[in-house]
Image (spheres, rainbow, N blue to C red):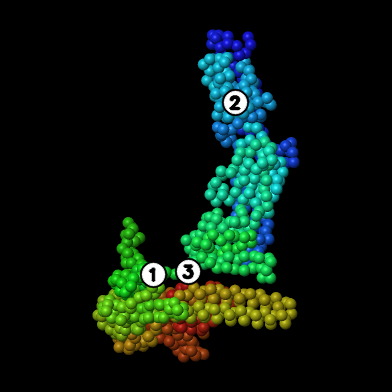
Amino acid sequence: MPVGTSSVASEAPRRVSITNANTANTANTANFADNSADSNVASSSPSAAGARPPVSGVRGPEVGTSEFQKFIADSTGKILPVFGAQFFANAASTYTPISGAPVPADYPLGVGDELMIRGTGSIDIDYRATIDRSGQISIPTIGPVALAGVNASDAESVIRKAVATMYKGVTINVSFGKLRAITVYVVGQAKRPGTYTVSSLSTLVTTLFASGGPNPNGSMRHLQVKRGGKVVADLDLYAFIAKGDKSADIKLQDGDSIYIPAATGHVALVGKVNTPAIYELRTANDTIESMLDVAGGMPVVADPRRAYLERIDASKSQPRSVEQFALSGNGLKRTLKNGDVLNITSITPDFSNAVILRGNVDQSIRAPFFPGMHVSDLIPSREYLITRSSIKRQNGVVSTGENDNVTNEAAGNIASRIGGLIDEINWDYAVVERINRSDLTVNLIPFNLGKVFSNPSSQDNVQLQPGDTVTIFSQQDVAVPMDKRRVFVRVEGEVKVPGVYQMTAGETLQNLLTRAGGATADAYFFGTAFYREQVRVEQQVNLERAATKLENQLRVEQSKNLANSRATTPIDAQAAEAQRQAELKIAQENIALFRQMKPTGRIAFGLDPQERSFARLPQLKLENGDRLVIPAKPEFVHIFGSVNAEASPLWSPNSRVDDYVKKAGLTVDADVENIFIMRTDGSVLARNTSSWGFGGIGGVIVMPGDSIVVPQKMDRETAWTKFTKGTREWAAIFANFGLGAAAIQVLKQ
């Protein structure tokens, strides 16, 4: 029975299956006419489509610098980018051809478009059809259906009506597979002109991506689509890039031509603009205002009162000129010309109504000025002068952990921090810095900070002016006289009340001992140790200088030895070089050990070993951080070095160095001529005569706590002998830098 007759629809329902034999094989080939339609590939003919050529480069300074860019670089020192060039430069990595995108409802179907038709009910349909040259598809048992020119949104209803003429109760669903390809032409000042086979969904912008956009001479502001000899679109790409305006981006049709004309001209926007770059003029009437609009305007730091326009006029003997004007009113309406450079300066980061407080304060601030403002208005109370570091120290005295064994501070650390919870302020001197705007000179106005609080009506409560800077100093910033400094000192050991004491200006060691209740009966006066931080700092500086001096001497000596070895025979020179390298290694290791030492800041009082009171202590004025340690009388003497057994024998009265050396026993390689003593009072005693025994170091009476050092004289080098070479020099170093016996332990490790 012929398809389409009414009798078919009246027959009893029966299930019919309509399928494509190759449906399974083609199910995954959807969306475009072929892969080449996706690729938007330039080719001399449609048959060449199918292989995308590589992107040939990007426009702008990354690949080639235009003459105008070079000109701007000579003027500004910077190679500015061409605005919009990056839009196409990124295309190679960001552009993806149209694939799988929804088909627009208003898309007109045409020859080559593929539809996938599915139906359920009285008939099962699973059919893939492509619109043929007659504009139709042919569905088995149903017949031809005209679809060319039908909008995509209407295709399903058209097919449903066609099926309904033959079968009742059929639900129809239509989707789209591959869409047809169209051929367009990219001409003019294009980066890659040619013939392009693209998807029928392609637009002017997407095809420009595929072609790489304009070349360095091409326009980005007049991208035209020509159809049937007429211009049907004129796209300003700046409007799209700067504001997202795609109103001129039309869908392309088969046979369209994209024409890229030459650029009208270029200007440069430099300085304080949101997007400094080289910009293309759209017309000969473009203004500064319109170009700033494309550039995103000016940042808040731009100074609209001062703009500089550099202009080229090739007809003049001096072709370049510059103008200055404000970017307001007529200034913004100025017309730009090809080659112009607009330079917008930044505002001066100056405050017209502010004063600054800085230094030893809670926090540096910039406060608003008001007429009649004084220092006391800027610093309402003394609490404003408590620094953040002081508060941090105060907060740090409270443990916050859960484990008491971890969070408790060591006693020595606690004692050293007593009195240091706040940064002491220099109440006698603070200063106002004032800039004279007429001649740009700076005036200093000192004032007594203490009087600002004790007598606000005094002249020290300086009346401020806009732009003033008020600086508050601590006693560490500017050292105050001794009688105005805080003095917290520690006394430890054999005194009746050890602790940390606050002393007044001018008080001495004797005053400190009186505060501490005096010495105990076990006090060993000869071993008294006194430490001062300033002395430690000076000793450390001198120690570094000495180490540097030793290194310089080493280099000079090595240079001399090397020069002398050149005048010898090859065999002797080889032996001398080996000796030189060995000595160099020893010397370098000695200097490294030297640098490990840390001065203590100890001051030796030089008391008589038999002293039994502090009557002979110097009348030394105390300073903040001083530490006095009075030990009990030690019971031992220490002996190190080339002895049979390093030991700490009991001290016995009137015993001499020779006595302890004999008890310890010397090794066969002991250098008895260079024995020295590290005394418990911090002094160092070395051999001062050519004899041993009672006429030299061996006859010296050893005091409790003294350390006897016996060097080694053999050629065999050990860590100990490397140090003890040049014993007299090392002994002097120990004495001069207050290194103490602890330094020997460092060297022995």
Amino acid on which the number 1 mark rests in the picture: Asn
Q: Mark 3 points at which residue?
A: 348
| Residue 195, placed above or below residue 65 | above
Q: Mark 2 points at which residue?
A: 116
Task: Report the residue at 60% width, 66% height from top.
Answer: 310
Amino acid on which the number 3 mark rests in the picture: Thr
Quadrant in the picture for residue 421: bottom left
| Residue 158, placed above or below residue 597 | above
Place of residue 492 in the rendered image (x, y in percent of width and height, measured from the top left)? 31, 76
- Ranked by sequence position, the earlier of labels 2 and 3 is 2
Judge from the rendering whether residue 451 lies leftward or rightward of residue 703; answer left or right: left
Q: Which of 307 and 685 is in front in this view?
A: 307
Place of residue 475 in the rendered image (x, y in percent of width and height, measured from the top left)? 36, 78
Residue density around tag 2, few if under 14, some if 14–19, many if 20 or more, within 10 Å: some
Screen quadrant of the N terminus? top right
Residue 662 in sight:
no
The mark closer to the camera, 2 or 3, is 3
Mark 2 and mark 3: Cα distance apart in space: 68 Å
Mark 3 and mark 1: Cα distance apart in space: 14 Å
Residue density around tag 3, few if under 14, some if 14–19, many if 20 or more, within 10 Å: few
Task: Report the residue at 52% width, 67% height from top.
Answer: 306
Place of residue 369 in the rendered image (x, y in percent of width and height, measured from the top left)? 35, 70
Which label belongs to residue 353? 1
Residue 595 in sight:
yes
Quadrant in the picture for residue 526: bottom left
Mark 1 and mark 2: Cα distance apart in space: 74 Å
Amino acid on which the number 2 mark rests in the picture: Met
Task: Report the residue at 30% width, 88% height from top.
Answer: 615
Q: Which of 620 and 359 is in front in this view?
A: 359
Place of residue 138 in the rendered image (x, y in percent of width and height, measured from the top left)? 64, 21
- Look at the numbered disc 3 and give the secondary structure of its residue: loop
- Look at the numbered disc 2 and give the secondary structure of its residue: strand
